[in-house]
Image (spheres, rainbow, N blue to C red):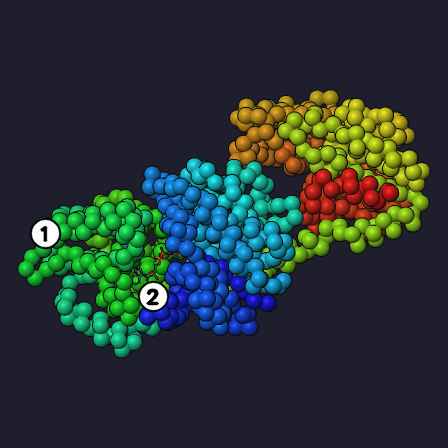
Amino acid sequence: MKLVIIANRLPVKIEEKNNSYSIKRSEGGLATGLSSLDTSIEKFWVGWPGIYVDDKSLQKRITRRLHAMHFHPVFLSQEQIEKYYEGYSNSILWPLCHYFFSYIEYGSCFWEAYKEVNTLFCEESLPFIDENDIVWIQDYQLMLLPKKIRDHKPQANIGYFHHIPFPSFELFRVLPERKELLEGLLGADLIGLHTHDYMRHFISSLYRVLDLNCDLDEIKLQDRTVHVDAFPMGINYQKYHDAALLPAVRKESAELKKKLGNQTIILSVDRLDYSKGILNRIKGFAQFLENHPEYREKVSLAMIVTPSRDNVERYADLKTRIDQTIGQVNGKYATVGWTPIHYYYRSFDFEGLSAMYDVADIALVTPLRDGMNLVAKEYLASKREKPGVLILSEMAGAAIELTDAIIINPMDANEIENAILQAITMSEHEKKERLWRMQKTISNQTVQKWANDFVKELSYIKKQNEEIYQKIIDKKQLAQIKRQYDRSSHRLLVLDYDGTLAPFYKKPEEAAPSPILLSLLEKMAKDPANHVVINSGRSSEMLEKWFGDLPIDLSAEHSALYKENGEWHENFKKIEQWDSEILDIIQRTIEKTPNSWLEIKNTALVWHYRKADTWLANLREEQLVRALIEPCTRLNLQIVPGNKILEIKPSAFNKGTEIKRRMQKEKFDFVLVIGDDTTDEDMFRAIPSDGISIKVGDFSPIAKYRISLQSKVIPFLTKLIS
Ligand code: ADQ
């Protein structure tokens, strides 16, 4: 077994000099996290190597060298990078996920290029994915890839991690390609996000865009379950914690201190990006200097900005505005010996960055949106026992864990100003206490743990999905069931109707049996060895209307009434008058839930919400259950949730009651029950241990077998009786 990591970029730096190539590993956070995984798991990476190579023979040479490092390059053309990476990924998905909706730029063929490159990644990865491998796809550039791999390898164990925020549905819905993107992700078994807020947004997009059934953090697809979970990414804690002990870092930080004197240093570190809130930060700092002149010449802001995409107009504009704003602030407040803002527009090496973290008294991390933000964690780890205060934007994923930071709204310059003042005036004791608590959190939630947790959960889901697969009736199992069927001479065949023999319709009365089904039932009933029963929650009138002419038995309203040898009987008396309080509660719910309605049956009340908005219906269902608990308990009624319905019925009977009654009366040597709903589990429980219980649709731990789709039930029964 190996772990195949597929990411937009390989963790390598390739440099060309006079047609010869040097290849070096670049240790990003992800690579570090993976390095600590069980060393017996081989790791293999697939990704863009970061250079353009057109010459095929050169591509082959580079590929050979990368293979020796367990990397496989996906070579992309300049045009593909422009349209897939700079285009769809960074001009559409990035601004959208960071709530910069108006920054979206639709370019021609961006989407086509995104699809094309995702397909290319799939083709390039497939030869390296063996049966037992774990596949872990990284980030928003490859959202279509999970499904593409699943289409070729239905049994693969696939995970996906989204490193940036997942926006609220209201924003996500504006994407014309929203459906394809979500379907692409659902190819994975496990979808990881940094925080539970992103999880919530993702799940709400799933049921609004795809109308899927989500059971908390599980999405039940026809043939497997997809899990969604929060995995807050951490850092290599020990590396940053020990950095200040390195001779190079000590030397550099001593030099910095000499130059900066006794000033309080506020540090900020980010990539040039509009999501990082760089301008707001300068504004907040300037306001602090304006309103607190006593701190002028005593406090400086050191801003490290890594150059990024400044060939793109929006980024070049941002850079110009940052340059200008810093110029204005420095122009206004600087004195001969003091510069308010030290600005470094370049990348720092690890030692240089660690020295900055070491000397900084305060870290000012103010993104307007950020998936996680690792700088905040790196700063805290680097401080060791030295007091350091973190001011952190509530819009960064990290704010969920780092609650001992001074949390601010980055849009509010007053909050930034006040936070700086609070940080400067905070007692040493409080600074150390807060720092210690946050260090405890991040030293536990490291990048190593993040990778471990993800891979462990993915493997666990694989096992669970395998169990689901195992129950699916394949050819071998069908032959086995058929052998048992053929050998028997007195059979009880109990079939649920909606969702089992017929698909669901928005209007329940439209679900009339098809001629194929009617003829199948007739054939089944013709065999004198067979006793066929349709066991449904439907009313006796409806069942009689649809099946009254067939020589089969019926069981209506969850066994309250049954028809045997052509005659209807009551297991339970018709309820003539329902409790008015219960009717009132349901009526109020209907008024507040458009497209929901009440069905009054002989022995049950059913609130139907198939046509209502899913979110609203779920909310109303919860409220309804809460309101009904008291009167239903008092009246000995049961509240039974079903497929887009909530049923209120006496607790004296369920779908298993009719089966038990039958089996007490007669001895059968073959019992088969099929159903799709949770209420059908009472039938599964009622049959003897050698009986055959089949769940249609998603997994049931109680049923012995599974048929994944309703449409496969009639073909199954046809083969069984043939
Ligand atoms: P990024 O947007 O890259 O990552 P972040 O998490 O802050 O953002 O990581 C930045 C990294 O770059 C840090 O390790 C930092 O030390 C380094 N860095 C920044 N500026 C630097 C400079 N001038 N010199 C040297 N190093 C510098 C995406 C998401 C984040 C999410 C991560 C991880 O956008 O929200 O936290 O992935 O999932």
Q: Amino acid at mark 1?
A: Gly
Quadrant where the C terminus sits is top right
What residue do we see at 62% from left, 27% from top? 582
Q: Residue at x 45, y 47 (%)?
A: 113
Asked if residue 122 lies left or right of residue 165, the reply is right
Front-most of residues 89 and 216: 89
Can you identify the residue that label 1 sits on?
A: 331
Q: Position of residue 681 (x, y in %)?
A: 73, 44
Question: Image check: 653 left or right of 393?
Answer: right
The crowd level at tag 1 (other Cα within 10 Å; few <14, some 14-19, many 20+) is: few
**Which label belongs to residue 582?**
none
Query: Taking 324 as reference, is 23 left or right?
Result: right
Where is mark 2, residue-wise? 381
52 up-or-down from 187: above or below: below
Q: Position of residue 96 (x, y in %)?
A: 39, 43
Task: Please tell me which residue is depicted at 26% across the width and 73% down the height of the picture.
Answer: 249
Q: Image quadrant for the N terminus?
A: bottom right
Q: From this viewpoint, which residue is outermost toward the bottom?
A: 247
Instruction: Tell me the quarter of the picture where residue 238 sits.
Output: bottom left
Q: Quadrant of ligand 1?
A: bottom left
Query: Along the horizontal axis of the image, is 512 left or right of 407?
Result: right
Query: Is the CB of the residue bearing disc 2 within 8 angstroms of ligand 1?
Result: no
Q: Is residue 328 above or below residue 646?
A: below
| Residue 202 percent coordinates (x, y) | 48, 45
One can see residue 557 in this view: no
Per the model, the C-alpha gap separating discs 1 and 2 is 35 Å
> Which residue occupies the foreground of this view, 129 or 20?
20
